[in-house]
Amino acid sequence: MKGYFMEPQNMSVNDGNGIRTLIFMAGCPLRCQWCSNPESQGSPANSRGRGSLVREYWLDEIMEIIERQRIFYRFSGGGVTFSGGEATMQLEILDEMSMLLYDKAIDMAIETCGYFDFQAVKRVMDRMSLIFIDLKLFNGQAHRKFTGMDNALILENIRKFGEMDYQIVIRIPLIEGVNTDQENISHTADFISKHIKKPKVELLPYHSFGDEKYRDLQLELPSREFKAPDKSSINEIRKIFKSKGIEVVKY
Ligand code: SF4
């Protein structure tokens, strides 16, 4: 079995517990204007980075990369985190990989944009010990403007994760002038505290680490348009979440 991947990254410590291997899967239904992985956008087989930053890998190749890191997982309490793009866009190979890793008792987490058919991906999510799910903007129109898609399905999926008590962390990229206003943060916080029993958010200020990929792909740089809020705004945002009983976590 083959799939479309960017280069896996070993020794990550920011996307789950312990030392992890990040498996970046190509394809994403969204097109966020600030995306730091633009090569993943589009369909898996025809993503923007196909042929340069994205290539086909055999399932065995990916499993070998993971196997070689096993000792680090064992001593750090780490494992594998599926990322992208949106990993659920290649559901067949994701299902197969996660089943093999589950059988080997390798810990798994996933980062998702939340834009998926819940029933279709449920069996994969059931194998994850932690699910990072993005909530970029609460207002549907603004979400569509900046990401190309409405957020109704994403909100519905967060609600379902909450109902079924999955271990989730809501990730919010903070981009000044896009989603850092009090109205967006308050509505987001209200929604999260209403639907998740022990709510956790991780705040991720915008960064320009993806600029080099934009240059490689000859695309306009998002960092010309977007920037992170300053420290005092981030503190205010943190306070709003905490005031609604939401834990602000950092991986
Ligand atoms: S969901 Fe993530 S990978 Fe997809 S376009 Fe947005 S930032 Fe990029």
Image (cartoon, rainbow, N blue to C red):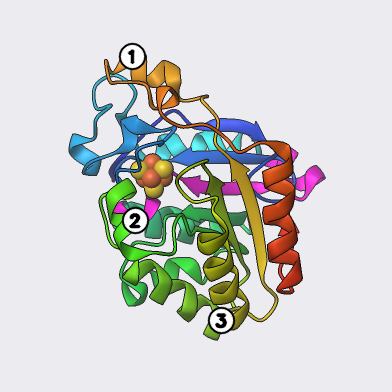
Residue ID at (54%, 39%):
22
Q: Position of residue 65 (x, y in %)?
A: 53, 33
Q: Which residue is mark 3?
A: 195
Category of crowding for the residue at label 3, using alpha-carbon neighbours closer than 10 angstroms: few (below 14), some (14–19), many (at least 20): some
Q: What is the spatial separation of the Cα atoms under label 2 and label 1, in whole angstroms?
A: 29 Å
| Element type at mark 1 | helix
Q: Residue furthest bottom?
A: 163
- The nearer-to-camera label among 2 and 1 is 2
Q: Which residue is mark 2?
A: 142
Q: Height in image: 194 above or below 211?
A: below
Q: Height in image: 187 above or below 164?
A: above
Category of crowding for the residue at label 2, using alpha-carbon neighbours closer than 10 angstroms: few (below 14), some (14–19), many (at least 20): some
**107 relative position to 181: left or right:** right
- Figure quadrant of residue 84: top left
Q: Would residue 50 be seen by someone viewing this image from the given angle?
A: yes
What's the amino acid at mark 2? Ala
> Which of the two discs, 2 and 3, labels the residue nearer the N terminus?
2
Category of crowding for the residue at label 1, using alpha-carbon neighbours closer than 10 angstroms: few (below 14), some (14–19), many (at least 20): few
- Figure quadrant of residue 60: top left
Q: Position of residue 195 (x, y in %)?
A: 56, 81
- Figure quadrant of residue 153: bottom left
Residue ID at (35%, 38%):
33
Residue ID at (67%, 45%):
233
Q: What is the spatial separation of the Cα atoms under label 2 and label 3, in whole angstroms?
A: 22 Å
- Span of residues in magenta: 70-89
Q: Which residue is mark 1?
A: 216
What's the amino acid at mark 1? Asp
- Tell me, yes or no, whether the highlighted magenta stretch contains residue 47: no
